[in-house]
Image: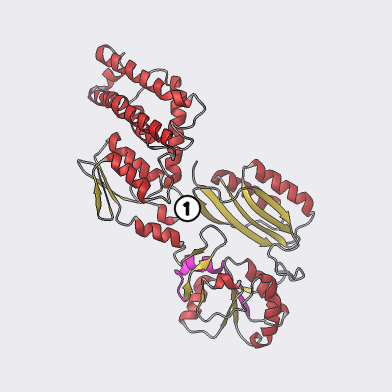
Amino acid sequence: MGPILNVSFYRFTRLDDLARLRERVKARAAEAGLKGTILLAEEGINGFLAGSPERLRSYLSWLFAEVPGLAGLEPKESFSADIPFTRLLVKLKREIITMGRPEVNPATKTGRNLPARELKRWYDEKKDFVIVDTRNVYEIAQGAFAGAIHYDIETFREFPEKLADEAAKLRDKTVVMYCTGGIRCEKATALAMDLGIRDVFQLEGGILKYFEETGGAHYEGDCFVFDHRTAVDPSLESKSERAFREKTADLVATFPPNDPMSARVEIALQTKGIPYARESAADFGLRHGGRAIGSIAEALEYLDEAFPETPSLSPDRPERIARMAEWTAWVDRELAPAAKEWIELRGKLSPEERSAPSVGESLALEIRLEKLLYRLKTPLQRSRRFLVLDAPTRADLAAYAWVRALRAADFPRDYPERFALVWDWMAAVEGEIEAGLNPAPKVLRRAGSSIWPN
């Protein structure tokens, strides 16, 4: 599976016939295989969705064109290795962000947008303004803008009463209100205007946009977010991501050129989403945290031991570990030598010789390799996606490295459809590698992304 696209979007706009709209919105999202939550109210829409990038973007194009008032809406995007939602919900609500004041209508009146860079300039130039945090107290505990005032609220429902109590102090001030992503401020500034606070702004795109555009100047601490990360710093990196980046900062792997044997370690690194520095050398090697490893088998063991936060490439039951070991030994004992011989042979032949019918030793080698690929089909014929489990293990990486090299060397020469199960298995392994290469967090993006030289 490739990377999962996550989007969030909202707009305050008048929506009618909500029950019928809900059914259309939900049916189309379900058809696209999306997960997440969409809130619909007379005042607008608020959504959080995840799915394949192509299907999700297609759905959003339909949604924003189909629903009046949503034209030009630009969702915020991020990526993850997995879908963070378990189901699809489309709910009808009184408000798309609950303040308990449905009469407050940001679609008709709201504060002026203040771009992130402009707020930074105000801070830099020491402009006279008051900055008000509209978030809940547990969010503010993670971090806030320098000098910001807040009202110790547990929920946004408490905000109107607190602001009403303070409105008289703010009526002659230039007021900037902010929240995580912008939606609460649209209502908060509309309420402020109803209370007679006229010179009121809302931070455009919220804290997250401010982090993205300014690097977090004048903000102290992290920003609470409503997902598995809990909080992100001004580089939009979570504490766990930062710890992982620091943990892998000195990981270096060296690989001989065009070597499928050691390539399985690089495949493992990429499948597990572990960033690393890649170097070329005559021999394989892995260096990390003062430890140097020269054995491929030991390196694969070490990656699972040292990085338990990444997907394991080893089964957790003894009988399955034994089966993985048997397959890996079979690859090294039988598939690897035959594949290496074929690759070397094809490299020595002229284009004319390559296209000629196989004879003698070449024919015998071709027949032997075909039998080995038929052997590889055996577990796949049992409705198993991979050789041992429904996720790749080190056995899959070992076999994949050599089968991939064989395919690059034009094997099999005839009737490749005989091995359709093997090619499907290859595609599944490649999908797992791609998912490891392209998860959302910046910490997991790496240089040296190609296993196979051009």
Residue for point 68% across, 44% down: 28
Q: Is residue 302 left or right of residue 83?
A: left
Q: Is residue 209 magenta?
A: yes
Residue for point 24% across, 40% down: 256
Residue 34, given in percent of the width and then of the height, sits at 61, 46
Residue 224, given in percent of the width and then of the height, sits at 54, 66
In front of the other: 123 or 155: 155
Residue for point 67% across, 82% down: 197
Residue 353 shows in this picture: yes
Locate residue 7: give its quadrant.
bottom right
The count of marks equals: 1
Coloring basis for residues:
secondary structure
Residue 48, given in percent of the width and then of the height, sits at 61, 55
120 versus 173 height, above or below: above
Please, which residue is most extreme toward the top here?
A: 360
Mark 1 burial class by Cα count in 10 Å: few <14, some 14-19, many 20+: many
Residue 142, given in percent of the width and then of the height, sits at 51, 70
398 versus 360 height, above or below: below
Locate residue 104: give its quadrant.
bottom right
Residue 454 shows in this picture: no
Q: Is residue 422 magenta?
A: no
Residue corresponding to mark 1: 440
Instruction: Tell me where the magenta segment starts and ends, as one range.
Output: 200-218
Q: Quadrant of the C terminus?
A: top left
In front of the other: 300 or 108: 300
Residue for point 35% across, 23% down: 411
Amino acid type at image mark 1: Ala
Please, which residue is most extreme toward the left here?
A: 282
In front of the other: 328 or 403: 328
- Element at badge 1? loop
Please, which residue is most extreme toward the front here?
A: 318
Q: Is residue 438 left or right of residue 51?
A: left
